[in-house]
Image (cartoon, rainbow, N blue to C red):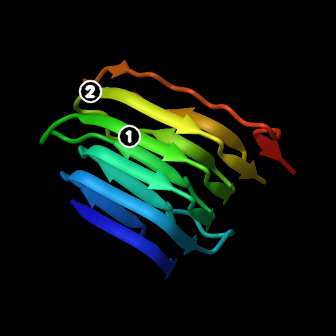
């Protein structure tokens, strides 16, 4: 198991990229990217299973949380909770890589600020989307 806690990461043109992994836990991560720069994804989770992202602060100009799949396999059991997100693009975007299936994705208690889209689906390859997708919040999901 890989665990990452209480880290501040300032982006140039890259993101935290979780690739072909199993049992990754990310807590209390702060990601700051240039709000006016494209291609500054916050966290890309690619063909990885059993991933937990919790209590993170993601402030970036591109997609904040991006589940993707490649030819190496599916993405199963992703849980994202209690995160604060500011982005000019999608707070959560599935794709653009969708070569294998997505299953059991859970998003809960996200605070999304200044985003063009809360959820984006870019499913253009051979993968299918079989997901349990829950967004529950006591606050408005999108805030301006």
Task: Note whether residue 102 is visible.
Answer: yes
| Horizontal relation, residue 133 to residue 96: left or right | right
Q: Residue at x 87, y 51 (%)?
A: 144
Residue 126 at x, y percent in the picture: 25, 24
Q: Is residue 94 shown above or below 48?
A: above
Residue that lies at the very extreme toward the right in this rendered image: 144
First in sequence, mark 1 or 2: give its number: 1
Residue 72 at x, y percent in the picture: 12, 42
Q: Is residue 65 shown above or below 5?
A: above
| Horizontal relation, residue 78 to residue 138: left or right | left
- Along the line of sight, the residue nearer the viewer: 90 or 29: 29
Q: Is residue 102 shown above or below 9?
A: above
Task: Note whether residue 124 is visible.
Answer: no
Residue 135 at x, y percent in the picture: 62, 31
In the picture, the disc for residue 101 is 2
Residue position for label 1:
78
Q: Residue at x 56, y 72 (%)?
A: 30
Residue 15, image quadrant: bottom left
- Along the line of sight, the residue nearer the viewer: 83 or 58: 83
Residue 52 at x, y percent in the picture: 39, 50
User: Do residues under tags 1 and 2 come within 8 Å of each other at their CB atoms?
Assistant: no
Secondary structure beneath dot 1 equals: strand
How far apart are the two marked residues, 1 and 2, measured between alpha carbons?
13 Å
Q: Is residue 141 shown above or below 61?
A: above
- Along the line of sight, the residue nearer the viewer: 27 or 97: 27
């Amino acid at each position: 198991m890989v665990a990452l806690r209480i880290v501040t990461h300032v982006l140039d043109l890259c993101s935290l990229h979780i690739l072909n992994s199993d049992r990754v836990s990310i807590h209390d991560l702060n990601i700051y990217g240039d709000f006016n720069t494209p291609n500054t994804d916050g966290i890309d989770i690619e063909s990885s299973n059993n991933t937990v992202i919790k209590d993170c602060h993601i402030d970036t100009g591109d997609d904040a949380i991006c589940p993707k799949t490649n030819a190496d396999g599916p993405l199963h059991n992703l849980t994202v909770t209690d995160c604060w997100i500011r982005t000019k693009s999608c707070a959560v975007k599935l794709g653009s890589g969708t070569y294998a299936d997505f299953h059991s994705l859970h998003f809960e208690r996200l605070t999304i600020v200044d985003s063009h889209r809360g959820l984006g689906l870019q499913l253009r390859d051979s993968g299918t989307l079989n997901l349990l997708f829950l967004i529950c919040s006591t606050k408005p999901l999108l805030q301006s």
